[in-house]
Image: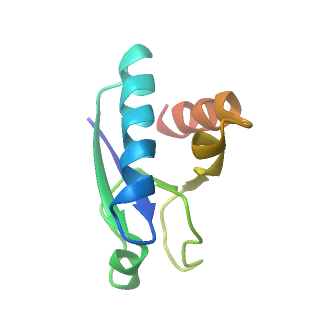
Amino acid sequence: MKKVLIICGTGVATSTVVAAKVRDHLAAQGIEADVSQGKVMDLMGPAPEVDLIVATTEVPATVGVPVVRALPLLTGIGEDAALAEIVSALS
């Protein structure tokens, strides 16, 4: 099972919206994934043990995990491309 971490500034508001969209889209694509939420400060320690980070905010360049920008999932502009990028990163 793939692990996806949704990151926002506080780990509450925008990550909740993005997490729901990512869960729904991955399920529709038949991809099993554990989607969790966190705040950007969670990334200041050791690299998280996840396959992908989907972030609504800037992520430190030192994180050794692929990152997909989640702003399109909040605005709707470029949402399909962002979801396709997530699926591609998990394939």
Please indicate whether residue 34 sits to the left or right of residue 20 in the image.
Answer: left
- Camera-side residue of 6 and 30: 6
In which quadrant of the rendered view does residue 26 lie? top left
Q: Quadrant of the N terminus?
A: top left
Q: Residue at x 73, y 36 (%)?
A: 78
Please indicate whether residue 40 sits to the left or right of residue 89 in the image.
Answer: left
Q: Residue at x 37, y 73 (%)?
A: 47
Please indicate whether residue 39 sits to the left or right of residue 62 in the image.
Answer: left
State the residue lying farthest toward the bottom.
45
Q: Residue at x 33, y 84 (%)?
A: 45
Looking at the picture, does residue 6 appear above or below residue 47? above
State the residue lying farthest toward the right.
77
Residue 13: image x %, image y %? 39, 57
Please indicate whether residue 78 sits to the left or right of residue 23 in the image.
Answer: right
In which quadrant of the rendered view does residue 76 lie? top right
Q: How many marks?
A: 0
- Camera-side residue of 58 and 65: 58
Residue 73: image x %, image y %? 58, 41
Looking at the picture, does residue 23 appear above or below residue 36? above
Figure coloring: rainbow
Looking at the picture, does residue 50 appear above or below residue 85? below
Residue 43: image x %, image y %? 39, 76
In which quadrant of the rendered view does residue 10 lie? bottom left
Looking at the picture, does residue 77 appear above or below residue 50? above
Residue 11: image x %, image y %? 34, 65
